[in-house]
Image: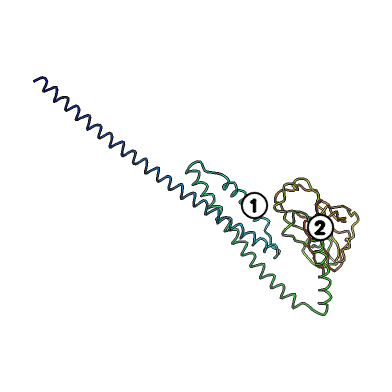
Amino acid sequence: MSDTRNSRTYSIVITVLLALSAILGFVFWQKSKGFQEERNKALAEKQTLELEKTNLEHELDSLSNAYTTLRTENENLQGRVNSSAEIIAQKETFIRQIKSSTAKDIAGLREQVAQLEKTKIEFETIITTLRTENEQLRAENERLTGENEELKGANTELSGKVQDLAKQLEEQIRKTQSASFKATSFRVTTARKTDKLTTKARRTREIDVSFDLADVPEPYRGPQKLYMAVTDEKGNPVVSDNPVKATVYAPTGPVEIIAQQVKAVVLEETQRLSFHYKFDERLKSGNYVVAIYCDKGLLGASSFRLK
């Protein structure tokens, strides 16, 4: 009788143990299944984020190219891209950093994608603004061209020849004396003593020259001397009580220049610079060429006319 009870008890214990084993096995299987599903989900999300990151990088490359094209057009239209140029340069540096870095986890990858999406929106905003400005400048240039056509008179041919001479001098300076980097958004304005803008030669005593220096190569950054030289359409330097003679070493060889003003600056990768100069004598009517040099050659030049 005792053996029967023991046998029954043993059977019950075995059954309970088997049941517990089955339950535990089922629980572990469920957990293993859930873990695998989470892992597969995380892997799928990571692959999606990596693809999205790659697509955003390609889109930003295209936007960068579009900005470069618009910026060149803006410069040709005499626009002002100095502020946006600096922002774009910073964003392109940021994009390169993200491209070269690998996220350690999905959270980091999400953050990179979010930053790229934000940068894309900023790019698109700047491009839209610049495109609008270019359209306005183009319309303004067309309007001014029309007005100039209406104002042409008996001296049109002579004025054209003189202006061509100044442009030819400007182009010749650019070809023979250009440095390894250049000034952009080059602008020249003349002023009266009252600081009101004018192009009347009998009142012109001061000149303002402004330009951007962007993407300055590393070897040329740091302390530099910049020279401003103003000549008439025949290449004769404008009269100055204290002219500065200097030699700049352009890619084509040494070039002797006579500058009206010298400025010591510290060049960075991107900056906007300007010269303000008061002439010793009032400028006569005619065409002039203003050129900005550094020790390595010409940075930029522009011709202007005083009537």
Distance from the alpha carbon under mark 2 to that under mark 1: 27 Å
Image: 245 above or below 289:
above
Q: Earlier in the sequence, mark 2 or mark 1?
A: 1
Q: Three-letter amino acid code at disc 1?
A: Ala
What residue is at 54 percent from the left and 44 percent from the top?
A: 102
Residue at the extreme bottom of the image, as rendered = 154
Q: Is the image coloured rainbow, by chain, by secondary structure, or in one colour?
A: rainbow
136 or 37: nearer the viewer? 37
Report whether 174 appears left or right of 96.
Answer: right
Report whether 26 appears left or right of 290.
Answer: left
- According to the picture, the residue beneath numbered tag 1 turns out to be 89
The local secondary structure at tag 1 comes to helix
Q: Residues within 10 Å of mark 1 (few under 14, many from 20)?
A: some
Residue 177, which numbered label? Answer: 2
Foreground label between 2 and 1: 2
Image quarter in which the C terminus is found: bottom right
**Label pair 2/1, CB-CB below 8 angstroms:** no
Residue at the extreme left of the image, as rendered = 1
